[in-house]
């Protein structure tokens, strides 16, 4: 199962943000976000709409270190995806090579 976590940012319309915030500032609960979605990032991708997708590397840190029991050995693999909607500038998806701006 893949866990999803969403982070909120102050957008272009700052009138919709908490007082004193500017575009790009993180909007989070008083104690911040908790959970395992951003433990150890292994891949970051920006889609054509400017959404940033970040994947997590581990599910159970103890199974990543040493020689775990065989039944737990596959729990070191990633299981989390975090999406930052609209965080990046939209890009043009290439047929080959790196993404390019519009």
Image (tube, grey):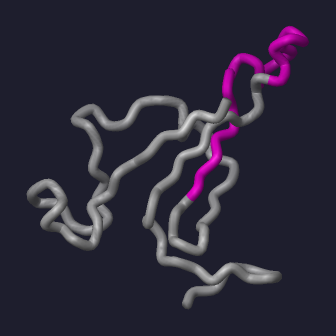
Please tell me in which quadrant of the rendered image residue 56 appears: top right
Q: Position of residue 58 (x, y in %)?
A: 69, 32
Q: Position of residue 2 (x, y in %)?
A: 64, 35
Describe residue 7's horizontal placement relative to residue 74 as left or right: left
Residue 53 in the image: above or below residue 29: below
Q: Residue at x 54, y 61 (%)?
A: 52
Q: Where is the N terminus found, in terms of image quarters? A: top right
User: Is residue 55 or residue 41 the one in the foreground?
Assistant: 55
Q: Position of residue 4 (x, y in %)?
A: 54, 39
Q: Residue at x 68, y 54 (%)?
A: 43
Q: Residue at x 71, y 36 (%)?
A: 78
Count of numbered circles in the view: 0
Please provide the residue range marked out in magenta.
53-74
Q: Where is the C terminus found, in terms of image quarters? A: bottom right
Residue 101 in the image: above or below residue 82: below
Residue 26 included in the magenta stretch of the image = no
Q: Position of residue 47 (x, y in %)?
A: 60, 68
Please tell me in which quadrant of the rendered image residue 33 appears: top left
Q: Of all residues shown, which one is farthest toward the bottom?
A: 102
Describe residue 101's horizontal placement relative to residue 29 as left or right: right
Residue 58 included in the magenta stretch of the image = yes
Q: Residue at x 76, y 32 (%)?
A: 77
Q: Of all residues shown, which one is farthest toward the right?
A: 70
Describe residue 7's horizontal placement relative to residue 67 as left or right: left
Residue 76 in the image: above or below residue 91: above
Q: Of all residues shown, which one is farthest toward the left?
A: 19
Please tell me in which quadrant of the rendered image residue 10 appears: bottom left
């Amino acid at each position: 199962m893949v866990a999803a976590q969403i982070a909120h940012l102050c957008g272009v319309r700052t009138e919709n943000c908490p007082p004193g915030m500017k575009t790009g500032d993180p909007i989070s609960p008083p104690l911040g976000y908790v959970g395992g979605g951003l433990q150890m990032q292994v891949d970051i991708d920006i889609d054509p709409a400017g959404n940033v997708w970040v994947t997590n590397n581990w599910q159970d840190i103890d199974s990543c270190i040493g020689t775990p029991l065989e039944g737990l050995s596959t729990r070191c693999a990633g299981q989390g995806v975090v999406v930052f909607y609209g965080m990046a500038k939209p890009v043009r998806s290439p047929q080959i090579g790196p993404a390019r701006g519009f």
